Image (cartoon, rainbow, N blue to C red):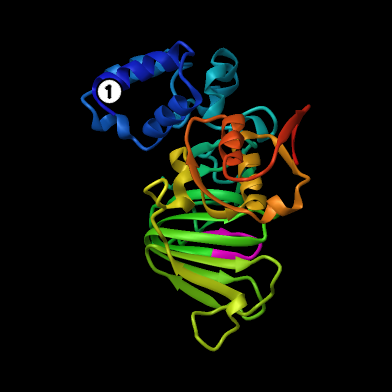
Amino acid sequence: MQQQDAKELLRKYREGLATEAEKTLLEDWVLFGKLKELDLTDEEIEAELSLIGEGLPLYKERRLKLWPRIAAAAAILTFIMAAAWFYNGKRAPNISNPNAELVFASPLGRKTSFKLADGSKIILNGGSKLTVAKGFNIDSRDVQLDGEGYFVVVHNSKKPFILHTKQIDIQDIGTEFNIKAYSADKTTETSLIKGAIEITVNDKIKSKVLLAPNEKFVIDNSEKAVIAKGENLPKKSFTVSPLVISAVSNSVAETDWAQNKLTFDDLPFEDIAAQMERWYGVKLVINNQQLKRIKFTATFGKENITQVLDALKLTANFNYRKEDDEIIIY
């Protein structure tokens, strides 16, 4: 993003003319401090963002307590922290209060970006919830995830960052990783981009796996198998495999969603439908049983759900119709 592009995007955002993709791009740039890498001065950034409802909540954490008034005055900011509307139904979690349990939620059809009190940055995918334990960043850093999240964790050896899911726990050893742990899915998986993570399986033995960069760990949610990185264990217990660059997106398919790309890499339509429900916030009902098993490889960016389905129809024999809030596929 060049200086001129950044200024134009700030203007469109302020005037309510930015597309969803443009909103997400700007919000992520602000969240991760990328605007400061441009030739824009702090005064220019502050002046522009102040016109968008006193700035982004994560850009100025000191304004979090003013969120109800800001949200009412700037409805276009709803994309940033959907948790603001799901935590106590009124206000955004106050990440500066370590004595309170915080809940960040991202509704279907939306992604939510935020930063925790320790500086760790997180993006939640649609239909996901992250619970931050009381006392976070005092003596420990524990969070609970149901759904999918991309984590850029600030390492602190004295206060390990531990992420809990139903099937596994993950301890950071200085890292950037993606984890997909929806309760309704058949598997729980985590992909390590940088650093290292230690995975503990939630079974009686509490077996451990140390994941290396560019590796992916997958466990079947229906199994209660013992897991360790050894050759003498059942193959169905888990898989550890290298991450592969997708031929269609030229990036890692497992993390494409955090870059606003909807990528399917040799996935059956049944799994694709679940991803599309979270991406677009629309219920898909598949009445074509054979279609559920057909695999697709494709990537999409700004396309709406109709455009995606029409594209998939070119390689498979199915039709669809809209009924209220559902799309029936037959």
Identify which residue, 257 or 276, lies in the foreground.
Answer: 276
Magenta span: predominant SS is strand
Identify which residue, 179 or 139, lies in the foreground.
Answer: 179
Q: Is residue 282 left or right of residue 121?
A: right
Measured along the vertical axis of the image, is residue 321 above or below residue 213?
Answer: above
- How far from the left and from the top, in percent, is residue 83? 60, 35
Assess whether residue 319 is covered by the magenta stretch: no
Secondary structure of residue under mark 1: helix
Name the quadrant containing residue 100. Answer: top right
The residue located at (60%, 34%) in the rendering is 310
| Quadrant that contains the C terminus | top right
- How far from the left and from the top, in percent, is residue 260? 47, 37
**What residue is shown with label 1?**
42
Q: Is residue 108 left or right of residue 328?
A: left
The residue located at (61%, 48%) in the rendering is 272
The residue located at (27%, 23%) in the rendering is 42
- How far from the left and from the top, in percent, is residue 317? 66, 44
Start-end of magenta stretch: 161-169
- How far from the left and from the top, in percent, is residue 217? 51, 66
Measured along the vertical axis of the image, is residue 267 above or below residue 167?
Answer: above
Name the quadrant containing residue 315. Answer: top right
Measured along the vertical axis of the image, is residue 54 above or below residue 126?
Answer: above
Circle 1 Cα neighbour tier, 10 Å, few/some/many (<14 / 14–19 / ≥20): few
| Quadrant that contains the N terminus | top left
Amino acid under disc 1? Asp
The residue located at (72%, 38%) in the rendering is 283
